[in-house]
Amino acid sequence: MSVPHADAMGVLIQADLDGELDAVQAADLALHVAACEECRQLCENLRVLKAEVRSEVPRYQAPPALREAVLRQVGSRPAVSASARRLRWRWPPLLPSFGAFLAGAAIAALLLVIVLPAPPTEEVRVAAQVATATERSLQPDHLLDIRGTSPTELAEWFRTRMNFAPPVRQPAGFQLVGGRLDYLHHRPVAVLAYDHQGGAVELYTWPEEHAPTLPKSLRVAGFALTYWREGGIEYWAIGRSPGDLAEFVEAWHRFP
């Protein structure tokens, strides 16, 4: 399955345009958008939509019944100061604007429901986290916590640090170069790093109680991903090349 990158990043971009991100989140998102043509275009499209909603949604006069209801409500309030009474005459001219605001808000909300993308699924959220962690691991000194050890020693290294020993295999054609601890999907995870003809493949694993599933492939943020569950473990394999990733998953399952 091919998942549009917008499904993974659209919610963050919308939140940023509405001023709902803090300074750190907004800065991180700005760096990503600057380097991602798809997100840059999505951001521009949402800005245009927001401006059009504000400028082109029609304004309506409040119906007489609404005007009378508001006047009755204002008249039923407790006595106010003399200065406030002097300003009361200004209420009626403002009522049409108040009605226009209500109508415009309702139409804008309807447009947002129709136009904006649906929240990402759990599958896409996890895929986006895996892709983000992998991108982060490519920074200097972030790829590995432990290098060049045997599968048995590597499994034991994880066991002593997270009370979980992932299966550690050396699939044909892929060189195991080490591993690291990471944190995603609200839990610590074990990551195995492989080299394949100069290309990197990473395998994220963690305990999972859900029923086993067959491998399923998708793409997020320029990465190819395949995930599956078996033996009480969830696996997420990720790499730049879909062909290399498919070969890795096949070789992993062929391993004795």
Image (tube, rainbow, N blue to C red):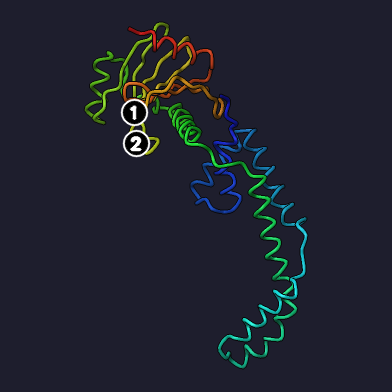
- Where is residue 233, by image quadrant? top left
Foreground pick, 214 / 220: 214
- Where is residue 86, by image quadrant? bottom right
* x, y percent for residue 255: 36, 8
- Mark 2 or mark 1, which has the lower sequence index? 2
Q: Residue at x 56, y 24 (%)?
A: 1
Mark number, residue 93: none
Q: In whole angstroms, how far apart are the C-alphas of marks 2 and 1?
A: 8 Å
Label 1 packing within 10 angstroms: few (<14), some (14-19), many (20+): many
Label 2 packing within 10 angstroms: few (<14), some (14-19), many (20+): few
* x, y percent for residue 201: 44, 18
Q: Is residue 135 left or right of residue 4?
A: left
Q: Residue at x 71, y 82 (%)?
A: 90
**Secondary structure under badge 2?**
strand
* x, y percent for residue 187: 34, 36
- Mark 1 belongs to which amino acid? Trp
Asked if the residue at tag 1 contacts the one at tag 2, i.e. Cβ–Cβ closer than 8 Å, the answer is yes
Foreground pick, 175 / 123: 123
